[in-house]
Image (cartoon, rainbow, N blue to C red):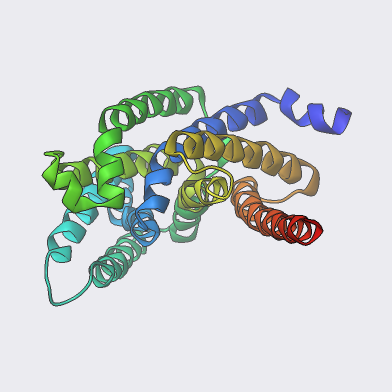
Amino acid sequence: MEWLITPFEVSFVQRALWGGTLVSLICALAGTWVVLRGMAFLGDAMSHGMLPGVALASLTGGNLLLGAGLAAGAMALGVTALGRSRRFSQDTAIGLLFVGMLATGVIIVSHSRSFAVDLTGFLFGDVLAVRGQDLLQLGAALAVAAVVSAFGHRAFVALSFDPRTAATLGLRPRLAHAALLCLLTLAIVASFHVVGTLLVFGLLIAPPAAAMFWATRIPLIMLGAALLGCVATTSGLLISWHGGTAAGATIAAVAVALFFVSALTARVREHLRRTTTKESVYSS
């Protein structure tokens, strides 16, 4: 068992484990709604649409979190405004803003001499460089995400399955949608500077999608997503340590692999169930 314990005896790997765990919990709360509402493309666009804000903050010496938050907020407002048009779908608005924001960010970053390093850090992060201050910020973000999820749960459920019913019940679907966008923004902004947009998006989508094969109630999906995210983090760090691979990308790859394992296992389970049912019918 030495191969399992040794990596986590190192302080920076311990911080990486805690950082990945906190990100997994935040993403489980936000990502469940993203998957249920079919907002994966929006989540991807927002995670990459932060680049202009991050680039400007980096070049001017400003706060990266503030720059990322402002850019993500602008992205969310733009998608909401353009999505109200009847001439094209919301996906079209998301795609246009996604490309525009990403291109703007690359243009801004290209003025920096460390272009390649900055862009790589933005996309992939450095989970092994997590500091104690980062853990405190992630802990605070998790607390806020938990409060928003708890108070908005009823409205989020109604919005996800029937917006008209939400309006009828007086749950104010537009306000609920705005709160959901804020929750998504919080998850992405709080986590990207620690683990990069690749890992954030991987943990935002893959664990909740995998958990939906095993649970139907939303709280159980969130719990399953959190557990799968923690498994992906721990396994990814172990593989990275022994295999010499990039930690963040390895964690994201494990998260996606867990989704396909869940999908395959669920399909086998369903096949066995049908086979058992047929045999019981014939035997009777």
Where, by quadrant of the figure, is residue 227 drawn?
A: top right
Image coordinates of residue 234 in percent, x first then y, are 67, 36
Q: Give whichever of 113, 122 is nearer the camera.
A: 122
Report the residue that reaches farthest toward the right.
1
Q: How many marks?
A: 0
Residue at 38% of width from left, 37% of height from top? 190
Say left or right for 35 vs 243. Answer: left
Where, by quadrant of the figure, is residue 106 drawn?
A: bottom left
Image coordinates of residue 272 in percent, x first then y, are 75, 56
Report the residue that reaches farthest toward the bottom.
87
8 lies above or below 62: above
Residue at 39% of width from left, 41% of height from top? 30
Q: Give whichever of 112, 251 is nearer the camera.
A: 251
Image coordinates of residue 195 in percent, x first then y, are 51, 43
The answer, for residue 128, to whether it is visible in the render is no
Image coordinates of residue 257 in percent, x first then y, are 66, 55
37 lies above or below 11: below
Where, by quadrant of the figure, is residue 13 drawn?
A: top right
Residue at 26% of width from left, 28% of height from top? 151
Say left or right for 282 vs 60. Answer: right
